[in-house]
Structure formats: structure tokens, C-alpha cells
Amino acid sequence: MSAPYAWSDLFPAAAPLTEGPDHPQGAPGGCLRPPAGESEIRRLEERLGLELPPSYRQFLLFADGWGAEDDEYCIRSVATVGWLRDLEPWLAEAWGPEGETPRSVPDDLYFVYGKEQDCINLREEYVPDTLLVGHWNDGVTLLNPQVKTPEGEWEAWFLAPWLPGASRYRSFWDLMEAEG
């Protein structure tokens, strides 16, 4: 059994997203979708060929994303989550120009989180294999299955054009807690 995550604490005044042209948009917590079902999540895991990290999986059981899919602020629904290389190939390719070796960094620089982290210390070779789970302003929220904790959490990234790399977190929960 994985640890419980207090999603209702991060989204205390959450109102479900309503269908139609007048649904609420913008700030987190105001436009959560109804929870995804266990069977929908299992189908996503089958499609990806991997088990989802516990905090992200529990978020989907709390809400199948928030915001409109075409909004610049959203967490994608189970139906629209996918690999960055498939959903936004131009972005995945931008981190690995053809004919060039992606820049990598040693563990002692890479595995630094929090205020001491320098976002430039990104392993570019991981970018195409990240899972695109959301958009925030002009950036993307990604989950990196190449870096997993013993509990099964995947590293979470916020990647934006104005960052020289990515803000990285140990888990989806940590990212949402820091950015929320």
C-alpha cells in the first residue's frame, strides 16, 4: 500500500469542472474534473507499459485532471496523458538536436532537489521519454520514469522555455505542493 497524499488539502475549495462553454478556468482548485476510475487508470498503465507513480495515480483517483485540456493551465485527463515525444515531438526534439549528443550531468549534480538545485543540471537524454501530464503557463509538467524512488515515485519536472533546464522534484506530489 502506498502512502496517502492529501490532495484535498492542496485543493480545499475544489469545485468539479462542469461541462459546457461556461466552465470555470484558471486557478487550481476551481476546476477539478471528477475522479478517474481504477479501470481507466489501469488502461493508461497498459497503454504506457508502466505502472504510474503512487502520488500521480492517487491524484487521478481524486480528480481526472483540472482545467480545460486546451487551457494553458491544466493537468491532463487520463485520456490525454502521453509521452512527450508523441504529444509534442517538437519539444522533445528541441532538447536533442539531430546529430548532437544530449548534455548529461553526473549524479552529484543531478540528484539535488530544493533550493540548492540548479535547473541547468538536466539530463537531456531523458526529455523524450518523459510523460506529459500538464501545462502551466508556457511550460509543461512532466514525469520522468528514468528516475524512480524505492516507493515507485517518478521524478517530476517543470520545463519552460524561460528556464535553462527544468525545475525537478522527487515526485508529482512534491511538484504540486511546491507549485500549488
Image (cartoon, helix red, strand yellow):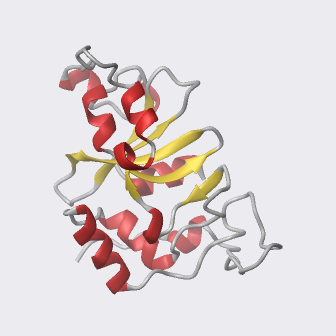
Q: Position of residue 85 (x, y in %)?
A: 35, 43
Between 142 and 19, the one lying in front of the other is: 19
Q: Residue furthest left?
A: 150
Does residue 59 sit above or below 100 in this rendering? below
Q: How many labels sit on residues?
A: 0
Q: Residue at x 45, y 34 (%)?
A: 91
Up the image or down, 104 lies above or below 88; here it is above
Q: Please report the residue visible at 44 percent of the width from the left and 70 percent of the height from the top.
A: 79
| Near-viewer residue (24 or 174) | 24
**Residue at screen point 37% across, 35% down:** 113
In the image, is 135 to the left or to the right of 95?
right
Looking at the picture, tell me which residue is in the foreground, 10 or 68.
68
Residue in view at x 57 percent, y 69 percent: 9
Q: Quadrant of the N terminus?
A: bottom left
Residue nearest the viewer, comparing 157 with 111 = 157
Query: Where residue 111 sits in the image (x, y, percent)?
Result: 27, 32
Residue 70 quadrant: bottom right
Q: Is residue 64 above or below residue 102?
A: below
Residue 87 falls left or right of residue 8 = left
Q: Is residue 123 left or right of residue 58?
A: left
Q: Position of residue 69 (x, y in %)?
A: 60, 61
The reply to whether residue 117 is visible in this rendering is: no
Residue reaching furthest to the right: 22
On the question of residue 159 being in view, the answer is: yes
